[in-house]
Structure formats: structure tokens, C-alpha cells
Amino acid sequence: MIDPEECIDCGACEPECPVEAIFPEDALPDKWEPFVKINYAYGEGMDVVNRLTDEYATEHNVQNEPIA
Ligand code: SF4
């Protein structure tokens, strides 16, 4: 998660991400648009973030296998 209250949009993290998962909001590919809402929910607490993430995972059938 990127804390939207702390981030100053400097872009330093973008090239460091090994899976190219960081984008400026105005350059986000359409397929990742649902994560804007999830990222903004950071300020509402991790329970809200986890609920939204679970909803996204269920809707898109991307559940992880449980950790043994
Ligand atoms: S490194 Fe990334 S998360 Fe940190 S302030 Fe810069 S753009 Fe925001």
C-alpha cells in the first residue's frame, strides 16, 4: 500500500518495484482501476482494505491458495 497522505508523488518507488505495480494515478491501466478505490481505503483501516481486496479477488477469481 502507498499511504496517500504521506506520498508526495515523487515517483522514486516506480522504477524500483520488481513487478511494475506502481503507477501514477493518471497513468493507471484500466484493468487496475479497482485498486484506486482499494488504495484510497488505506485511511479507513486495514479491515476495509482487506474486505475490498477480498471482494476484488472473489469477483475476478484470483484467490490465493491458503498458506499451509
Ligand atoms: S517513493 Fe513512491 S510512495 Fe514514496 S513519496 Fe515517492 S511516489 Fe510516493
Image (cartoon, grey):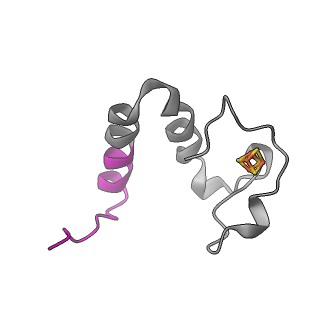
Q: Residue 29, percent across and down?
A: 69, 57
- What percent of the width, then of the height, locates residue 2? 61, 44
User: For the view shown, which residue lies furthest in the top direction?
Assistant: 44
Q: Does the stretch in magenta take in 63?
A: yes
Residue 16 point in image, percent of width and height: 73, 68
Query: What residue is rendered at 34% in x and 52% in y?
Result: 59
Residue 38 lies in the magenta-colored region = no
Residue at 65% x, 54% y is: 30
Q: Is residue 51 above or below residue 29?
A: above
64 left or right of 29 in image: left
The image shows residue 23, relative to residue 50, as above or below, that is: below
* Front one among 30 and 37: 37
Place residue 57 in its image quadrant.
bottom left
Looking at the image, residue 61 sits to the left or right of residue 24; the answer is left
Q: Nearer the viewer, residue 56 or 7?
A: 7
Q: Quadrant for residue 6, please give it.
A: top right
Q: How many marks?
A: 0
Region rendered in magenta: 53-68
